[in-house]
Image (cartoon, rainbow, N blue to C red):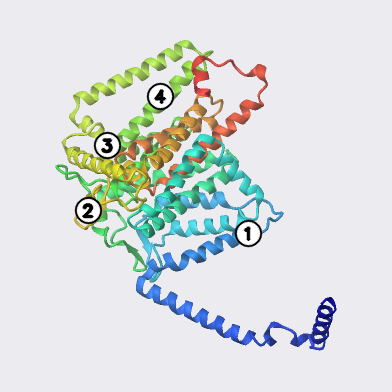
């Protein structure tokens, strides 16, 4: 048997050797012609099938056609080998441009190109940033290490956010429309995680944090300047001047042009580049703490700019005419005062005791004065606690909470984000389900576990920011407390605002706090033991 096998192999080798090399290829095999015909037929069929889906479903067809292509492209990119290359990608510039344009450009004005999805300048920059990250991180081990080390700096926050992401996957089979829920989660995840991952890479150098915050402050000031012209024109100033190659969502055009006034109060409410006034007030609550901190630290000629910014801030908050804006301003001011007071009393006990006593007295006096003013002034009470104008929205929100708890008892796992149940939200005249609280969206969408994961992660990181401020020894570390107040304002406003498009900013601030907290811990660990001050009981409580 062995001899037969050997002779057969030898005969085969002699036969192949008699074929000239240029003819010993796949193209000259008998089966290659049939395989080529089958491959071309399959390609033509897939081309016609894809064209048919796009013709019938428009851009919605990309959900089915583009998903497997994107998955294979992602796997292929991730399998790229590591290269010996410097980790100096331009992610910081792209992130800064993207976050600036997110405020400077009206999100509801897009480039009108037939057949394309909603394309705006910020999304174009985001696309460039995504392409850069998808080609950079798979090949640069150092870049991946930077991101993973920073995002995993605090194990509790990392696990809580991981729980939120896990619940988004778990609830998909339980969603009324799994395809819609998956599409929403993917789109929102890309918008949120892109900025978060880019920020984690950028903030390995913590000195970039104040630079990015100042760029965001300039964008915020620009948005406030727009409100002056908008309030004078009683409409967004670019309406009537939008070129023909751009478009506005026709289903919401009437809402964008309306004064969005409250019942019983016909005043126009400014919203700058945001389509809805409450969305702008939520953004303003996150940008006010960095702005006021920079005003507080201003020196020299910049103090003249501070004098001009004070009336600009007040007029913006006044003409927004929303509790979320006025409460955010008060929380920012008293949050700063409270953090400085606690730091002065418990973390810097060797300071001037008279100065600390005066500071505490002034803060308490201001709080007492504000409480008295709210109690005695009907208008001030309306702008903080609320009045008859807010009774309608409060009643609707209470009904939504009742529906939300019924939905949670019916399905405690979650029904999927982006697909609120009709019995939870209020039905608008256009047939859209409206929910007035992001808390409700999370509870119904990803269940109590997903809610705890997201809000718990944000609260934990805000706490780390406050701890960083209380232990701070320089202005860089003080940014931890500044950004913690921004996150607190978001958490507070999310109870009455259902809006996820500001999450990119929230997560960027969260990553900045993690970077500052890690930077501070590294400096504390590097200090000689003899130079570390003995912690007071309050300090020990915070460190635990």
How far apart are labels 1 and 3 at the CA level? 51 Å
Q: Quadrant of residue 284?
A: top left
Q: Name the N-terminal-most of marks 3 and 4.
A: 3
Q: Which mark is residue 79?
A: 1
Query: Which label lies toward us, 1 or 4?
Result: 1
The residue drawn where x is 48% and y is 45% is 215
Residue 161 in sight: yes
Q: Position of residue 434 (x, y in %)?
A: 26, 50
Pointer 4 residue? 337
- What residue did someone put label 3 on? 323
**Residue in view at x 51 percent, y 30 percent:** 478
Of tags 2 and 3, which is closer to the observer? 3
How far apart marks 3 and 4 lie (CA) works out to: 21 Å
- Farthest-out residue, top: 354
User: What is the spatial separation of the Cα atoms under label 2 and label 3, in whole angstroms?
Assistant: 20 Å
Instruction: Tell me whether circle 2 and circle 3 mark residues in contact (CB < 8 Å).
Output: no
Give the vertical position of 4 relative to 394 (above or below).
below
């Amino acid at each position: 048997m062995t001899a037969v096998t050997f002779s057969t192999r030898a005969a085969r080798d002699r036969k192949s050797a008699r074929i000239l090399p240029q003819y010993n290829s796949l193209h000259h095999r008998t089966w290659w012609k049939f395989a080529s015909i089958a491959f071309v037929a399959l390609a033509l069929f897939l081309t016609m099938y894809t064209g048919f889906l796009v013709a019938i479903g428009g851009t919605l067809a990309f959900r089915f056609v583009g998903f497997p292509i994107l998955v294979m492209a992602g796997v292929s990119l991730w399998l790229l080998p590591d290269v010996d290359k410097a980790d100096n990608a331009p992610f910081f510039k792209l992130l800064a441009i993207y976050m600036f344009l997110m405020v400077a450009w009206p999100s509801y004005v897009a480039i009108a190109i037939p057949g394309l999805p909603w394309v705006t300048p910020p999304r174009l920059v985001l696309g460039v940033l995504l392409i850069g990250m998808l080609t950079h991180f798979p090949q640069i081990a150092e870049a991946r290490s930077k991101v993973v080390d920073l995002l995993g700096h605090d194990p509790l926050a990392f696990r809580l956010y991981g729980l939120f992401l896990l619940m988004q996957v778990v609830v998909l089979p339980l969603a009324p429309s799994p395809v819609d829920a998956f599409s929403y989660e993917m789109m929102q995840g890309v918008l949120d995680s892109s900025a978060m991952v880019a920020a984690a890479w950028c903030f390995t150098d913590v000195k970039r944090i104040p630079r990015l915050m100042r760029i965001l402050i300039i964008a915020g000031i620009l948005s406030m300047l727009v409100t002056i012209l908008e309030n004078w024109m009683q409409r967004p100033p670019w309406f009537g001047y939008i070129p023909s190659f751009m478009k506005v969502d026709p289903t919401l055009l009437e809402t964008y042009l309306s004064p969005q006034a409250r019942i019983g109060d016909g005043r126009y409410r400014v919203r700058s580049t945001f389509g809805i006034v409450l969305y702008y007030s939520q953004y303003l609550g996150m940008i006010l703490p960095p702005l006021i901190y920079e005003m507080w630290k201003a020196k020299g000629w910049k103090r003249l700019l501070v004098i001009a910014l004070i009336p600009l801030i007040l007029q913006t908050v006044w003409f927004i005419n929303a509790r979320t804006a006025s409460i955010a301003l008060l929380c920012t001011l008293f949050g700063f005062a409270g953090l400085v007071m606690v730091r002065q009393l418990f973390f810097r006990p060797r300071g001037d005791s008279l100065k600390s006593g005066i500071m505490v007295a002034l803060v308490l006096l201001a709080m007492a004065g504000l409480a008295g003013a709210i109690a005695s002034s009907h208008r001030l009470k309306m702008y903080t606690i609320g009045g008859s104008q807010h009774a309608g929205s409060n009643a609707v929100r209470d009904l939504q909470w009742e529906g939300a708890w019924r939905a949670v008892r019916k399905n405690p796992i979650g029904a999927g984000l982006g697909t609120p149940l009709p019995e939870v939200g209020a039905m608008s005249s256009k047939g859209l389900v409206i929910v007035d609280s992001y808390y409700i969206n999370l509870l119904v969408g990803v269940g109590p576990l997903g809610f705890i994961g997201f809000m718990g992660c944000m609260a934990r990181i805000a706490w780390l920011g406050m701890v960083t401020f209380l232990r701070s020894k320089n202005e860089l570390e003080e940014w931890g407390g500044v950004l913690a107040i921004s996150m607190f304002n978001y958490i507070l406003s999310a109870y009455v605002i259902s809006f996820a498009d500001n999450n990119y900013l929230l997560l960027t601030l969260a990553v900045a706090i993690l970077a500052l907290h890690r930077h501070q811990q590294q400096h504390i660990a590097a200090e000689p033991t003899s130079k570390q001050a003995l912690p007071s009981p309050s300090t020990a409580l915070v460190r635990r």
